[in-house]
Image (cartoon, rainbow, N blue to C red):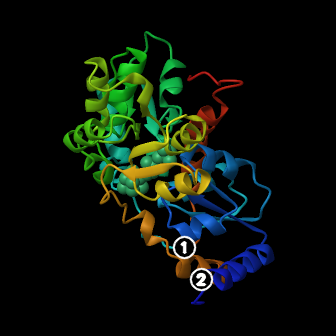
Amino acid sequence: MPDSFDDWARRVRRLAGERRAVILAHNYQVPWIQDVADFVGDSLSLSRHAAQTDAETIVFCGVHFMAETAKILSPDKTVLLPDLGAGCSLAATITAEDVRAWKAEHPGAAVVAYVNTTAEVKAESDICCTSSNAVEVVRSIPEDREILFLPDMFLGAHVERQTGRKLQVWMGECHVHAGIGAQEMRARAEAEPDAELLIHPECGCSSAAIYLLGEGVLPAERTKVLSTGGMVREAASSPASKFLVATETGILHQLRKANPDKTFEPINEYAVCQYMKTITPAKLLRSLEEGVFEVTVPEEIRVRAAAAVERMIALGPAPIPVP
Ligand code: 13P
Ligand code: SF4
């Protein structure tokens, strides 16, 4: 392993060029990896990049379901994940068998799956969503259609409030975001009346934040429930100079780098996803040197999962209706 960032970054960039590889990194990756990547973003923007890239290889610095999503969208490309152990506690809360049993209890319901799911679960779903577009995805489904929303209960509750629709919600949670609690969020917000609150909808405190907004305890103009990409955009455009951030702490690097004159503090400094941090600079280098570890998806599953992901990607300019 090279001993300076510059030396390591030069080797990574040279190898990426030789492999005709694009390096995609999620906002929760360690700073070195964010800084060497071709593109850093949230789940939705990374999916869009994976679908559009003309690189031969995608090196995904994120977790397994994200690399799988890239493979689902770009089956002819080689997709590498520097460590196959980069899982996700939220994705692990539901299996394809669980979805089939749930659908059997609710015949005719539309299944909306957060991208934090395995390819097998996506294959059982009608449409995917991310934290950036979950509200729009649910709004794209006819009002009279029952919806099974999986697997995150806090995101599900957020979507119910935003759309005014009752959903059947799977009771899964991400252990990192569930650990960002309402009490610490409220105490920090009250102690810093000028700071803006940036809250990820997977957080345990997001339901409390919306309740406190309704009660007038938190002012609407400085409390925002956003995806990680939404936080980056909000921080750039907001007049606030201080932000309290409720999500995995990797996002702080992106926020501080893009806004050096503003202050960002985590609501919970221990909100660290060990799965995201499984990807280290040494493993990224090895991945490019040795072409490891390839992520594959059986074609029969990929085709069905792709239909759900592509419906999500197409939402916006030309939505594809849920069948
Ligand atoms: P974003 O889509 O907001 O980046 O969130 C993804 C996520 O929670 C991965 O853990
Ligand atoms: Fe999964 Fe939570 Fe880690 Fe995101 S932060 S990858 S949802 S365990």
Q: Which quadrant of the view contains residue 102?
A: top left
Q: Which quadrant of the view contains residue 312?
A: top right
Q: Residue at x 61, y 32 (%)?
A: 311
Would you say residue 108 is visible in this rendering?
no
Q: Residue at x 66, y 26 (%)?
A: 316
Q: Where is residue 200 in the image (x, y as percent from the top left)?
A: 40, 41
Question: Which amino acid is tagged 1?
Answer: Pro
Q: Which residue is drawn at 29% across and 45% down?
A: 173
SS for tag 2? helix
Q: Residues within 10 Å of mark 2 (few under 14, many from 20)?
A: some
| Residue 311 shown left or right of residue 109 in the figure | right
Q: Position of residue 223 (x, y in %)?
A: 40, 31
Question: Which amino acid is tagged 2?
Answer: Arg
**Label 2 close to label 1 by CB (< 8 Å):** yes
Depicted 208 relative to depicted 268: above or below? above
> For the residue with label 1, is its CB less than 8 Å from the closest atom of ligand 2?
no
| Residue 259 shown left or right of residue 191 in the figure | right
Q: In which quarter of the image is ligand 2?
A: bottom left
Q: State the count of labels.
A: 2
> Gap between marks 2 and 1, in whole Å?
7 Å
Where is mark 1, residue-wise?
Answer: 82
Depicted 244 relative to depicted 268: above or below? above
Where is mark 2, residue-wise?
Answer: 286
Q: Position of residue 186 (x, y in %)?
A: 24, 37
